[in-house]
Image: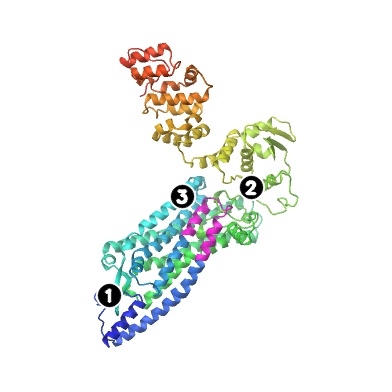
């Protein structure tokens, strides 16, 4: 009878995933008492609660979340959704998806449906909790990073470019994942596998490691972790988004005043007003929802313990908190679709196997979790502050006007930018034509003169009326990108060659805006021994790029000096590298041989080195930086014999005398000894 009750009690214990109290011997249990029957009734209530919360509700949430985030990843990786903001959103979707996938095993375990092998217990003890929580924490950190990006776009637009670039985004994403996983390392030791014997079979379950969870340091760690992962981000997001809302409303008011839509002017349309209010309410609502979904989970982490496994009130709160947190990670795709017209169009195009349509009048509002991107054209709010979420404006670059397209006043265009882009698209009222290579570009002299000082000079020299100009110093692609930027202030993602062409065109026509955009993208390029000479040839006038190249040269001087593509360096680049002094630690003969190798590429075949000497001394005395004064007598004799005509007899005598008796004779005037 006792053995039967022991087996029955042990089976019940395993089925409920209950960890035994430390003072209880699990192979010997007392007979049933009235208290046991009350406990059994409570256990049955908890089991029903778990079935409803984890078996039904959470399963539906996880299924919808996995479906939504999978679709989200497919949509966000489409070619038309480019930009820094979409990079953040893609990795946010990855974190949310992984959180939900790993949570599946947690739902099975909480519902009492898990394997009870030793390996499974090791996974549940040391891997499951850290893994799912680390992915959830990375999601929260990415939300914070994206909110900071939106904060700069709205509240500090002059510094927006400092934070809104792919390099900063990659660093922020990497930091989010690294910090999240490092933060949850101690949780790996929170539980341990416990053997439980039932009948003649031993099974394993994951139970609290009392030596760890009872330690004061671990309790302090839990408090700090929850502040960093949940409470801290909730407060920070509330502050940032509140500031964004306030600044956004002030900006809207200023813009209405500028357009004559203040109280003394025309009353704004109800549609515009509703759109503005929707954006503000959405931002506020997202902050509140984030607070509601995160705060219970933070409290749960601090209160959670195996000894409350069958406390109905605690388990009710636990199910509520876990379900809320899962919903937070599951609903992002649906929030994206509700808030971003660009994502909606891409999703519809993906489902219908068509190309995404351009964004004309549809609303551009906010992305998930309160990061403001681009606003609806109906609000007439310019999108300079909110770069990244609406995608590039699609422009027809044909020369002929498409009569099927409505004119700006026919399709409701109200912003100045859209109107200017429209007339470039249609080429209506074009009064100047440029021929670049084999292509012809029509444009409007008034807009070009207002946007580029060089265009202004060029067009002032011409008589009024239609005219045609030829431009020979830029490529067709570079000129097209320049015109596109002048009319739209936008630059698509470009490969390196096109970006250099755009940079050359912007330099020629002194278009500072395009120059800045190109420079910000160029300075992110990787520098290697194979491309450093080419980069200095083309981009030495970009100070930040020049300094990066020189820093690379300092750290890799010998490799650059002996690289095959050293011969690609222009005379100015070659002098810059030698004049920097970074080659001074290389042997003098190595410097001299590679300098002559470079000179040989610039000159026709020759019988002696007199022409190479002239090239290496003309204007910039490269030969004087080769360290010839450091050679000894034997090396000098080898140099003179091998490179006839490189040095004059007087110079040979001077170097020989100084090799044996330094300072006895003055060195050639072009020679500058290494410092």
- Span of residues in magenta: 66-94
Q: Nearer the viewer, mark 2 or mark 3?
A: 3
In the picture, residue 585 is in which quadrant?
A: top left
Q: Is residue 48 above or below residue 290?
A: below
Element at label 2: helix
Q: Earlier in the sequence, mark 2 or mark 3?
A: 3
Q: Which residue is mark 2?
A: 417
Q: Which residue is mark 3?
A: 170
- The dot on residue 296 is none
Q: Is residue 534 above or below residue 369?
A: above
Is residue 409 rendered magenta in the image?
no
In the picture, residue 297 is in which quadrant?
A: bottom left
Q: In the picture provided, is 261 more to the left or to the right than 307?
A: right
Which quadrant holds the N terminus? bottom left
- In space, the residues marked 1 and 2 are separated at their CA atoms by 70 Å
Is residue 73 rendered magenta in the image?
yes
- Provide the major secondary structure of the magenta segment: helix
Q: In the picture provided, is 507 more to the left or to the right than 104?
A: right
Q: Is residue 631 above or below residue 246?
A: above
Element at label 1: loop
Q: Which residue occupies the foreground of this view, 311 or 633?
A: 633
Q: Residues within 10 Å of mark 2 (few under 14, many from 20)?
A: some
Q: Residues within 10 Å of mark 3 (few under 14, many from 20)?
A: some
At horizontal 31% and vertical 84% (from top left) the residue drawn is: 36
Which quadrant holds the C terminus? top left
- In space, the residues marked 2 and 3 are separated at their CA atoms by 31 Å
Report x, y in % for residue 242: 48, 58
Q: Are marks 2 and 3 in contact (CB under 8 Å)?
A: no
In the picture, residue 19 is in which quadrant?
A: bottom left
- The dot on residue 21 is 1
- In space, the residues marked 3 and 1 are separated at their CA atoms by 47 Å
Q: Are marks 1 and 2 in contact (CB under 8 Å)?
A: no
């Amino acid at each position: 009878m006792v053995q039967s009750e022991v087996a029955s009690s042990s089976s019940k214990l395993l089925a409920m995933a209950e960890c035994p109290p430390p003072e209880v011997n699990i192979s010997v249990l007392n007979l049933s008492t009235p208290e046991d029957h009350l406990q059994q009734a409570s256990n049955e209530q908890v089991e029903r609660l778990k079935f409803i919360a984890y078996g039904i509700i959470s399963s539906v949430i996880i299924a919808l979340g996995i479906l939504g985030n999978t679709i989200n990843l497919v949509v966000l990786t489409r070619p038309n959704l480019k930009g820094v903001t979409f990079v953040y959103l893609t990795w946010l979707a990855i974190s949310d998806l992984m959180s939900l996938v790993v949570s599946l095993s947690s739902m099975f375990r909480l519902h009492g449906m898990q394997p009870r092998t030793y390996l499974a217990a090791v996974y549940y003890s040391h891997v499951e909790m850290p893994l799912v929580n680390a992915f959830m924490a990375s999601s929260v950190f990415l939300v914070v990073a994206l909110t900071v990006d939106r904060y700069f776009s709205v509240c500090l637009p002059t510094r927006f470019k400092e934070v809104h670039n792919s390099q900063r985004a990659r660093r922020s994403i990497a930091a989010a994942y690294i910090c999240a996983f490092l933060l949850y390392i101690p949780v790996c030791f929170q539980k341990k596998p416990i053997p439980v014997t039932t009948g003649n079979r031993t099974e394993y379950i994951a139970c609290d490691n009392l030596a760890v969870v009872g330690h004061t340091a671990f309790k302090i760690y839990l408090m700090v972790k929850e502040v960093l992962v949940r409470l801290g981000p909730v407060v920070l997001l509330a502050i940032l988004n509140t500031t964004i809302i306030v600044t956004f409303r002030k900006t809207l008011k200023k813009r209405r005043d500028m357009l004559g839509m203040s109280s003394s002017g025309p009353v704004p349309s109800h549609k515009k007003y509703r759109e503005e209010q929707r954006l503000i309410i959405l931002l506020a609502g997202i902050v509140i929802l984030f607070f509601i979904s995160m705060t219970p989970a933070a409290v749960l982490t601090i209160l959670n313990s195996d000894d409350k496994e069958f406390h109905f009130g605690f388990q009710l709160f636990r199910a509520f908190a876990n379900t809320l947190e899962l919903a937070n990670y599951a609903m992002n795709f649906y929030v994206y679709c509700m808030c971003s017209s660009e994502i909606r169009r891409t999703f519809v195009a993906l489902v219908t196997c068509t190309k995404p349509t351009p964004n004309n009048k549809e609303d551009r509002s906010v992305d998930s979790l309160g990061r403001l991107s681009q606003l609806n054209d109906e609000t007439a709010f310019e999108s300079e502050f909110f770069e990244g979420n609406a995608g590039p404006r699609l422009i027809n670059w044909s020369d002929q006007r498409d009569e099927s397209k409505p004119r700006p006043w026919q399709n409701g265009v109200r912003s100045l930018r859209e109107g200017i882009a429209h007339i470039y698209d249609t080429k209506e009222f074009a009064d100047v034509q440029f021929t670049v290579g084999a292509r012809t570009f029509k444009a409007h002299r008034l807009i070009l003169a207002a946007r580029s000082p060089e265009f202004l000079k060029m067009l002032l020299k011409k008589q009024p009326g239609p005219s045609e100009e030829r431009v020979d110093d830029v490529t067709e692609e570079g000129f097209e990108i320049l015109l596109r930027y002048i009319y739209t202030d936008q630059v698509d993602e470009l490969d390196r060659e096109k970006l250099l062409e755009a940079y050359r065109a912007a330099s020629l026509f002194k278009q500072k805006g395009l120059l800045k955009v190109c420079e910000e993208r160029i300075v992110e390029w990787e520098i290697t021994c194979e491309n450093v000479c080419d980069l200095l040839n083309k981009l030495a006038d970009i100070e930040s790029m020049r300094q990066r190249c020189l820093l690379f040269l300092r750290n890799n001087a010998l490799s650059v000096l002996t690289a095959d593509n050293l011969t690609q360096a222009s005379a100015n680049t070659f002098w810059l590298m030698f004049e920097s002094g970074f080659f001074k630690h290389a042997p003098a003969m190595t410097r001299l041989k590679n300098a002559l190798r470079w000179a040989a590429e610039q000159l026709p075949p020759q019988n002696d080195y007199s022409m190479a000497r002239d090239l290496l001394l003309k204007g910039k005395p490269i030969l004087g930086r080769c360290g010839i004064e450091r050679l000894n007598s034997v090396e000098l004799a080898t140099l003179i014999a091998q490179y006839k005509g490189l040095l004059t007899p007087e110079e040979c005598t001077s170097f020989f005398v100084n090799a044996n008796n330094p300072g006895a004779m003055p060195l050639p005037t072009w020679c500058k000894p290494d410092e």
